[in-house]
Image (cartoon, rainbow, N blue to C red):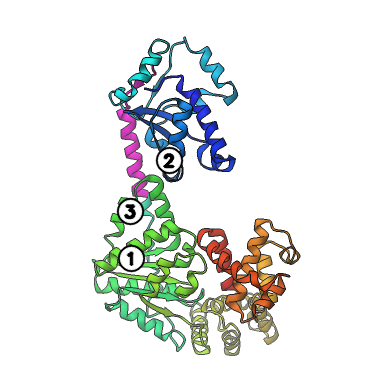
C-alpha cells in the first residue's frame, strides 16, 4: 500500500528517468507523471491523457519497471493510465511546490494528521496482497497509510451524463445538408466533364461500383456532383441513409470522439449509412488516425454492399506524395477513379451565359454578349474563375451601367481577376513559390545554413521540381548550389515528411495546386 513516504521517493524516481532517457524524452512524455495507487503489486501512474499513457507504455515500459525497483526499493508492475480514468488521486502540484524542498515538507509533516484524498479505485480494492505485506510491515510502526474515500456516485453519474452529451454533440455535427442547387439538372456538361457526369449518373442510378473517386482541381464541379448523386439517391428511395461529409466534419467528429472516448458510438452511427459522400479527402493529409478510421469505414461499407463516393484534388498516386498514407491511396486506386479536366470553351461559355441570363431575369441588366464571351475565353482555369469574373462584371454593370462597361474597362477587370495565375512552371517559378510559401529567402535556400525550416524548404523545392518539370537532377541541384547526388535522398525525405507532418503536407499540396 502506498504511504506518504512513497511520494517524495517518486520524485527521485522521475529524476532517474530524466537521467536515463534524456531531457527531451522526459519533457515530452514523462514530466507530467503522477503517482495514484497500488493494487496487488501493480502501481498505477497517471499521465495527462490516454494517448500519452499508451505511448509511454509502448515505448518505455521496461525502463519504468527497472528504475522503479532501483529507486523505490521494491518490485512492482508499473501501469500508466490517463489521469481522467484514475480520478486525480494526488498530483505533485498538490504535494510539492518545488521539487527541491519535497523531502523537507514530507518530513515535517510525518507526525501530522494525514489528509483524506480520493482515488480512482475503491478502498476495498486497495487492500495489500501478500506481495505488498513486507512493504506495509516496514512502514506500519512509523506512519499510517492515506485514508481513501469511495468514489462519489453522483460525480460518476455527472461524468457519464457529460460523456453522453459529448457523444450526441459529436454525432449531431457530423452530417452536412446537401446543397439544394447542386443537382444534375443544374450541372453544365461538355466534353471536358462528360465522363465524370456519366460516372456520377451511373452511381446515382445504382451501378455495381462500390467505390468511386472523382478528382480534379478546385472549381471543376466535384462537390456539385457529390450533392447531385445524393439528391438522386434520395429521390429514388427516401428511406436511404445518405451522408454528405466534408473533410473538416469528418476530422472534427473523429477528434471529438477520441477526446470523449466515444469512437465506438461514432462507428455505430457511420455503420447505419447506406451512401457515404466524402468531399476533399486530400485535406486529410498528415491525419493518419482519421485516414485509418475512414479506411476501416470504407471496408465495412463495401463488405455490406453499400456505396462510397469520394472527391479530391489529385489522382491517387499524387495524393500519396502529399501526406495520405499508401494504404488509403491504394484503396482509392482500386475503385473507379474519374478525373475532371479543365473546362473547355463550350462549357465556360455555357456557364457564363447562364449567369448573364439569371442577372437579367432579376432585373440587373443584360451584359453585352461580347463581354460574356471575353470572360469565357480568358477565364480558362476553372468554373469558379468564370463565376467569379461574371459576378465582378455584374457588380460594375450595376454601378456604372452600359456606358461604363467599355471594352477597355472589361479587359482591365478580367486581367485583374486572373493576374495571380502562373503561366509557366520553371525551376525559377518553383523556387519563388517555395520561398513564399515557407517564408524563406532564396539566398537562405541556396546557402549552407541548415536550420530545420530551411532544410524543409529545400526538400519541398526538390520534390516539386521533380514532379512538375522534366529538368535533370544536375539542373535542380544547381538551383540550390548542391550536388546532384543529394536530390533523390531529399525527394524521399520530402515524401516521408508530407505523410507524417500535416503542416509540411499542406504546403506541398498548396504548391502542387498553385503550380498546376
Which residue is at 27% across, 78% downward? 208
Indicate the position of residue 241 as horizontal and vertical percent values.
28, 64
Q: Quadrant of residue 514?
A: bottom right
- Is residue 474 on the magenta stretch? no
**Crowding at label 2, few (<14), some or many (≥20) Cα neighbours within 10 Å?**
some
Compare marks 1 and 2 and give the one earlier in the sequence: 2
Q: Is residue 293 left or right of residue 312?
A: left
Indicate the position of residue 3 as horizontal and vertical percent values.
41, 20
Instruction: Report the mark closest to the observer, 2 or 3.
Output: 2
Question: In the figure, 278 relative to 28: above or below?
Answer: below
Which residue is at 41% across, 50% downward? 256
Please tell me which residue lies in front, 396 or 62: 62
Please tell me which residue lies in front, 436 or 420: 436
Compare marks 2 and 3 and give the one earlier in the sequence: 2
**Crowding at label 1, few (<14), some or many (≥20) Cα neighbours within 10 Å?**
many
Label 1 sits on residue: 298
Instruction: Report the mark closest to the observer, 1 or 3.
Output: 1
Which residue is at 33% across, 29% downward? 121
In the image, the segment drawn in magenta is: 144-169
Label 2 sits on residue: 61
Amino acid at each position: 500500500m502506498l504511504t506518504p513516504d512513497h511520494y517524495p521517493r517518486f520524485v527521485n524516481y522521475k529524476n532517474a528517468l530524466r537521467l536515463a532517457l534524456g531531457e527531451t524524452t522526459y519533457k515530452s512524455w514523462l514530466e507530467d507523471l503522477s503517482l495514484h495507487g497500488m493494487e496487488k503489486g501493480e502501481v498505477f501512474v497517471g499521465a495527462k491523457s490516454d494517448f500519452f499513457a499508451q505511448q509511454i507504455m509502448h515505448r518505455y515500459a521496461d525502463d519504468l519497471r527497472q528504475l522503479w525497483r532501483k529507486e523505490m526499493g521494491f518490485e512492482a508492475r508499473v501501469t500508466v493510465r490517463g489521469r481522467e480514468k484514475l480520478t486525480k488521486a494526488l498530483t505533485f502540484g498538490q504535494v510539492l511546490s518545488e521539487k527541491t524542498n519535497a523531502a523537507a515538507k514530507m518530513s515535517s509533516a510525518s507526525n501530522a494528521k494525514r489528509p483524506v484524498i480520493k482515488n480512482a479505485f475503491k478502498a476495498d480494492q486497495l487492500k495489500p496482497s501478500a506481495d505488498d505485506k513486507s512493504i506495509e510491515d516496514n512502514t506500519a510502526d512509523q506512519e499510517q497509510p492515506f485514508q481513501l474515500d469511495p468514489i462519489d456516485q453522483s460525480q460518476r453519474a455527472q461524468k457519464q451524463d457529460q460523456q453522453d452529451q459529448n457523444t450526441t454533440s459529436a454525432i449531431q455535427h457530423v452530417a452536412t445538408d446537401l446543397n439544394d442547387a447542386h443537382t444534375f439538372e443544374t450541372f453544365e456538361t461538355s466534353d471536358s466533364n462528360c465522363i465524370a457526369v456519366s460516372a456520377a449518373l451511373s452511381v446515382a442510378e445504382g451501378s455495381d461500383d462500390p467505390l468511386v473517386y472523382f478528382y480534379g482541381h478546385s472549381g471543376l464541379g466535384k462537390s456539385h456532383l457529390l450533392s447531385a448523386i445524393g439528391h438522386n439517391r434520395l429521390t429514388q428511395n427516401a428511406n436511404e441513409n445518405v451522408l454528405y461529409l466534408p473533410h473538416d466534419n469528418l476530422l472534427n467528429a473523429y477528434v471529438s470522439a477520441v477526446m470523449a472516448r466515444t469512437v465506438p458510438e461514432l462507428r455505430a452511427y457511420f455503420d447505419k449509412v447506406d451512401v457515404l459522400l466524402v468531399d476533399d479527402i486530400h485535406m486529410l493529409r498528415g491525419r493518419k488516425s482519421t485516414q485509418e478510421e475512414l479506411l476501416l469505414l470504407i471496408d465495412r461499407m463495401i463488405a455490406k454492399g453499400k456505396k462510397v463516393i469520394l472527391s479530391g484534388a489529385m489522382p491517387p498516386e499524387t495524393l500519396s506524395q502529399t501526406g495520405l498514407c499508401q494504404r488509403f491511396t491504394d484503396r482509392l486506386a482500386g475503385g473507379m477513379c474519374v478525373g475532371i479536366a479543365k473546362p473547355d470553351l463550350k462549357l465556360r461559355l455555357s456557364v457564363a451565359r447562364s449567369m448573364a441570363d439569371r442577372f437579367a431575369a432579376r432585373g440587373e441588366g443584360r451584359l453585352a454578349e461580347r463581354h460574356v464571351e471575353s470572360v469565357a475565353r480568358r477565364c480558362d482555369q476553372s468554373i469558379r474563375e468564370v463565376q467569379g469574373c461574371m459576378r465582378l462584371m455584374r457588380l460594375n454593370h450595376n454601378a456604372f451601367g452600359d456606358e461604363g462597361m467599355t471594352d477597355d474597362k472589361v479587359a482591365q477587370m478580367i486581367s485583374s481577376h486572373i493576374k495571380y495565375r502562373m503561366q509557366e512552371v520553371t525551376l525559377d517559378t518553383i523556387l519563388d513559390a517555395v520561398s513564399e510559401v515557407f517564408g524563406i529567402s532564396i539566398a537562405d535556400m541556396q546557402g549552407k545554413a541548415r536550420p530545420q525550416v530551411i532544410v524543409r524548404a529545400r526538400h519541398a523545392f526538390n520534390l516539386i521540381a521533380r514532379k512538375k518539370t522534366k529538368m535533370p537532377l544536375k539542373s535542380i541541384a544547381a538551383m540550390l548550389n548542391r550536388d546532384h547526388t543529394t536530390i533523390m535522398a531529399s525527394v524521399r525525405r520530402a515524401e516521408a515528411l508530407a505523410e507524417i507532418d500535416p503542416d509540411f503536407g499542406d504546403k506541398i499540396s498548396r504548391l502542387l495546386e498553385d503550380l498546376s
